[in-house]
Image (spheres, rainbow, N blue to C red):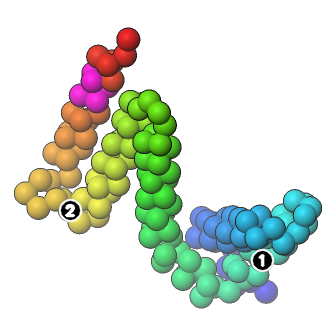
């Protein structure tokens, strides 16, 4: 019997993470041809993954790091897409800048600031950069 309630964020987020990783792994490895079978096997793996409370605690302890890794992969994917095209897309560059600044801002929030710059001042800096990037993109449009 599971010693904790399943429908809490403490358990639901690890369940969804294990489900997504298991399904994605089976999808990329092309183990089964039928997507329904992949989904059922992924759900079973996810249930087994969260049936142990110590495993749920471990997954919850690494979730912030996994979120940062996913954000970095997302930024790299945007950078690759926007810089590989024949013509540069200013919108993608602005999105990359905003995502990068938000990532740095999240680290600044966790640490209380960035050296001499406090978190609230850093948010103002992010806002100014976003406004300047929008003005630059509007100026470059024909």
The answer to which of 121 and 72 lies nearer the viewer is 72
Res. 95 in view: no
- Residue at image position (41%, 32%) is 88
Q: With respect to residue 65, does 73 lie above or below?
A: above
Q: Position of residue 49 (x, y in %)?
A: 70, 80
As measured in the structure, the alpha-carbon distance from the residue carrying label 2 to the one carrying label 1 is 39 Å
Which secondary structure, mark 2? loop
Q: Position of residue 24 (x, y in %)?
A: 71, 65
Check disc 1 and report the residue beneath it.
45
For the N terminus, give its image quadrant. Answer: bottom right
Q: Characterize the magenta stretch by its predominant secondary structure.
A: helix
Return the disc, 2 or 1, that comes first in the chain's sequence. 1
Check disc 2 and report the residue beneath it.
112
Q: Left of 113 or right of it: where is 29?
A: right
The answer to which of 142 and 22 lies nearer the viewer is 142
Q: With respect to residue 120, does 32 lie above or below?
A: below
Mark 2 or 1: the one toward you: 1
Question: What residue span does the magenta drawing correspond to?
Answer: 132-136
The answer to which of 131 and 43 lies nearer the viewer is 131
Q: Quadrant of residue 5?
A: bottom right
For the C terminus, give its image quadrant. Answer: top left
- Judge the density around disc 1: few (<14), some (14-19), many (≥20) Cα neighbours within 10 Å: some
Q: Position of residue 19 (x, y in %)?
A: 72, 68
Which secondary structure, mark 1? helix
- Residue at image position (11%, 61%) is 115
């Amino acid at each position: 019997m599971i010693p904790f309630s399943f429908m809490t964020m403490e358990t639901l987020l690890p369940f969804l993470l294990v489900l997504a990783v298991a399904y994605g792994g089976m999808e990329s490895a092309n183990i089964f041809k039928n997507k329904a079978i992949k989904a059922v096997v992924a759900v079973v793996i996810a249930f087994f993954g969260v049936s142990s409370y110590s495993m749920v605690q471990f997954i919850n302890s690494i979730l912030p790091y996994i979120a940062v890794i996913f954000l970095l992969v997302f930024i790299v994917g945007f950078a690759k897409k926007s810089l590989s095209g024949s013509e540069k897309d200013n919108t993608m560059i602005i999105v990359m800048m905003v995502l990068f600044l938000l990532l740095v801002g999240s680290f600044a929030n966790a640490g209380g600031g960035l050296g001499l710059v406090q978190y609230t001042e850093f948010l103002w800096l992010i806002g100014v950069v976003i406004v300047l990037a929008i003005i630059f993109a509007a100026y470059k449009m024909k």
